[in-house]
Image: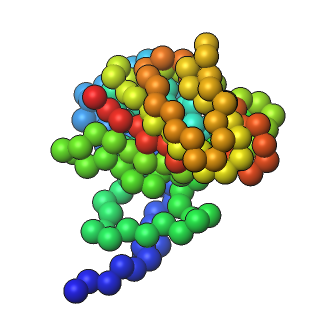
Amino acid sequence: MTQPHDNPPAASPQETIAAALRRERVRSGLSLTEVARRAGIAKSTLSQLESGSGNPSIETLWALCTALDVPFSRLLDPPSPQVQVIRAGEGAVLASAQSEYRTTLLAASPLDARRDVYRVTAEPGHPRDSDPHTHGVVEHVVLCAGRAKVGPAEAPVELNPGDYIGYPGDMPHVFEALEPGTWALLISEYR
């Protein structure tokens, strides 16, 4: 019987993202210039990201995912072992450029299933306003600690620990921490 074990050291988040961006851009048949234009970023920024020398924000990565028509996790998910353990506080962390909001991909959706699981940490201050993701995305959030307003931008719902909300991720939405130490599990479902 195979015993669970911790994951071996992996590539840095920048290296993983760089390889995935190059792979997905080539797969899409789009030029560097065209992907940058569709994502609304500078060509030089995309070039830096593909070379592994950039440090992208969540917003930049979402824009690139939309431009490439791929799930967010495709840029972060190297092949994983059959049993995967990610200890609290470990894993590749991506930060928002607009608020004190961080996310860690915990499990990407396999090709035959369409869901990704994230751990999100957030602090009070600036809400994390998210642009619409690709068509058909539904987000599911379970608040684990703290308090937060989560959901559609026009009508977020205040959540307490243990509360769940599901909402369309292909519409503007928000995550606003109301207490220090707020964290949640976020599942993005692709339909």
Q: Is residue 47 left or right of residue 99?
A: left
* Residue in the image at 44% along x and 77% along y: 6
* Residue in the image at 32% along x and 38% along y: 24
Quarter of the figure that contains the C terminus = top left
Do we see residue 187 in this rendering? yes
Q: Is residue 54 left or right of residue 46?
A: right
Percent x, y of residue 35: 41, 24
How many numbered discs? 0
Q: In the figure, 132 relative to 52: above or below?
A: above
Percent x, y of residue 77: 38, 52
Q: Is residue 101 left or right of residue 70?
A: right
Which of the pair 7/75 is nearer the observer?
7
Q: In the figure, 156 relative to 77: above or below?
A: above
| Residue furthest out toward the left | 112
* Residue in the image at 60% along x and 51% along y: 144
Which of the 4 image quadrants contains residue 158? top right
Which of the 4 image quadrants contains residue 177? top right
Percent x, y of residue 91: 53, 61
